[in-house]
Image (cartoon, grey):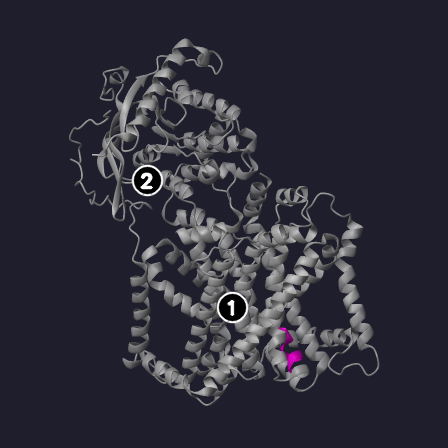
Amino acid sequence: MSRPTTVEPGTTGAAGTGSPPAGTAPARRTRRRPGAPGPGLRLLHVLALPALIVGVYWAVTAQPGAGFYTPTPAAIASAFADLWFSERFFVDVLPSLGRLLTGFAIAAVLGVGLGVLLGLDARVRATIEPVLEFLRAIPPPVLVPLMIMLAGIDDSMKIMVIVFGCVWPVLLNTVEGVRAVDPVLSDTARCYGVSGLTRLRVLVLRSAGPQIMAGLRLALALAIILMVISEMFASSSGLGFAIVQFQRTFAIPEMWAGMVLLGVIGFVLSSLFELVEGRVLGWYRGLRAANRGE
Amino acid sequence: MNHQNHQPNHQGERPAMLKVTGLQKIYNGGATAVEAVRDLTFELAEGELVCLVGPSGCGKTTLLKCIAGLMAPTGGTVELADRPVLAPPPGMAVVFQEYGRSLFAWMSVRDNVELPLKEKKLPKARRTELVTESLEAVGLTGFADSYPWQLSGGMQQRVAIARAIAYEPQVLLMDEPFAAVDAQTRADLEDLVREIWQRLGVTVLFVTHDIDEAVYLGERVLVLSNSPTVVQDDITVDLPVERDQLTTRQDERFTDLRARVYAQIQRAKRGTDQPVA
Amino acid sequence: MSTTHTRDTVAAGPPPDGTRRPRPLNSAFSRTAPNRPLLGALGIAGLLALWELAPRLGAVPERYFPPVSEVLATLAERATTAPFWEAVGHTLYGWALGLGIALAAAILLGFALGAAPRLRAFTTSTVDFLRPIPSVALIPLAVLVYGTDIRSTLLLVVYACFWLIYIQVLYGVADVDPVAEQTARSYGLGRLARIRYVVWPTTLPYLMTGLRLAAAVGLILSITAQLIIGSPGIGDQITNAQQGGAVALVYAWIVATGILGVVINIGVRALERRVLRWHTSVRGEAAA
């Protein structure tokens, strides 16, 4: 197996058609080397730098006359607790997350569905490809103003923006993955009478899994960005809207609390995704490790 | 000088299981057409184990794909139990050379073996029985829950063989199945094929480029010519049914047969110089 | 020596030129290659026709979906004016500068930390935490500190692009073949020479992947900054057009950004191919 033509889950991978992603390597396997550090050192590895950064930041911001825009971590933390451990969480944050996940889910289903269709048929693919190349090159945020004209500033606008922005990486990666199904495996499936939906389920989708997951990962990152932008640009509710309001009213600790929450959401969603990916692609990591060991 | 046409040997006693008649395959590569297989005719009687050897690049894989129904021949027919093969027939199982690529890496060994049985709509109990039996036959009883990539190359090929025999085919096609495993594993696997063949009475067509392997395994060896391919020789292997890596290979008859196949293949290679009609 | 044996086969033989088509079994071999440029042109023509006809025939409201001819006419008209190119220039400047800074920083840090696994172990948790933070979270801070200055745009672009490239560089450095490394050592190559001849070529494909991704994401954020913060550039122009109700102009700008995106994609891929000429993934692609 030649490394440079494979996609590693954990990276954004083959977001483009045509060129196979140059190789990418395991994100979290690096720590598994012989002579791995003990638990104490490991803990130090994890905590030392964050503690240092927060400490230095705290020391600087605690100075009298430190910047107005940089409240101390204590101030941010208390604003965070006041803001988000209250009903605002249900009013501002949950609807945002709902739109984010709805848009992402629609984009995933659309992207994988269309990607399979295009991946399996060379003619349709050749016909649609230039159009897709153009559509996916449009930076999704420019659609926000358009969608506002078309759909107002309600939920459907924001979801449409997320769907339109997220569908391309999923779609194009699925096409690549479906095209790359091993011909020997494909022949094997045919010999044993595996066809139709079973073929799609056990062969095509599974074999394209690594590429599809790479596309979904990129889509998830985009979905968060688009959720925030659509709410910042024009909205009357939502996390993005709240953060902009704080900034405009110079509620600085609250603004920081919003930024921190965004960071936490990004981190949590990405970690959840990694969990799912680990389950779905466990075989792929094993296969790669086995091939590397050879 | 042509030996290939229906010699009235023992296959007359048994009904023909696989019949290849006038098979031809031409690849249309844009402006140039390449004739990979010219005119192949041979039969496998029911329960026969026949090896197909030929110089490298003689179109063995093309032939096998045509027989398996994976590729449409340009001319000629393939018949399995008197029915023409137009798509992969249900009574045929194939073991490919690329064991690592013919197994589903995301499925356990058990699921790999069971998948075709599910497609055959066999009841669960019967599937379990077949999977257990076939894994036992290839000596992989304890590995049902492993993933293919956790096994060595030889073991992976055993999984592919187990999957093929669990499918209960009438004809088992093997496309250079042991070309990519090491020598010792290979000897073990050869004996495994003989054993399974004797036990199940399945018809086997075994494609190889290895002369020793062909003579050791086969009841009959078909020697293919260089591309465009025809059957150049059809040699009956009159070695005892019970074969053994050590004694059989030292048998004088074995060496004679090997020499004959070797000579035919050398002749086939020189055939390259012949102008293509 | 002849190995022929002529006899009529069942299929009676194909014509000598071999033009007889095989039965259309669904095999990779029996499938003829489609005429890609022709089909692609067909696809684009289809899209344009749909976009023109749907509003004209009243299938979609023309007020919100102006026909393509109107949009392209608007675009053509704008493209002759200086403000159009100024906006494009602003956007590209923020994009290129941000991408350049991110690239330089990612290469420097990536190589430094990649070469010092002990030190790198201390950074992993921080990187894993910072990386998934959406760069748009920085928008309010950028607005407060830099206003509509280009540094706002740069902050967003650099933050987003840096992680994409940095992670790839780390993968690349970690991927160096130990055998190649030992071979280089045994031939007495020094540290710098090893980086030059072993580490750098191994990392390059990874780096190019990171750059390709970052180029696309960088454009997105450059425009985002203008949309949300109001720094001068394409995003700002689109906001103005939308607020003025100039529907066709909004579409024209969207088409323009699409074209810009395509040009950037093509450019980065061409660069990738050029830089990685020797690499198998590129060679294979060229042969296909």
Q: Is residue C191 above or below residue B215?
A: below
In which image quadrant can residue C20 be found? top left
The quadrant of the rendering that contains the C terminus of chain A is top right
Q: Which chain is home to disc 1?
A: C
Q: Residue A60: where, in percent of width, then height?
A: 81, 75
The amino acid marked with disc number 1 is Ala
Q: Nearer the viewer, mark 1 or mark 2?
A: 1
Residue C140 belongs to the span the image colors magenta:
yes
Inter-mark Cα distance, 1 to 2? 42 Å
Q: Which residue is mark 1?
A: C216
Q: Residue furthest top?
A: B252
Name the one closer to the observer, B222 or B130.
B222
Name the one closer to the observer, C162 or A204.
C162
Residue found 34% across the figure and 16% down from its top: B260
Residue span colored magenta: C137-143
Q: Is residue B170 above or below residue A69?
A: above
Q: Which residue is mark 2?
A: B70
| Label 2 environment density (alpha carbons within 10 Å; few <14, some 14–19, many ≥20) | many
Left or right for C92, reference B239: right
Q: Residue furthest front?
A: C188
| Label 1 environment density (alpha carbons within 10 Å; few <14, some 14–19, many ≥20) | many
Left or right for B259, reference B146: left
The amino acid marked with disc number 2 is Leu
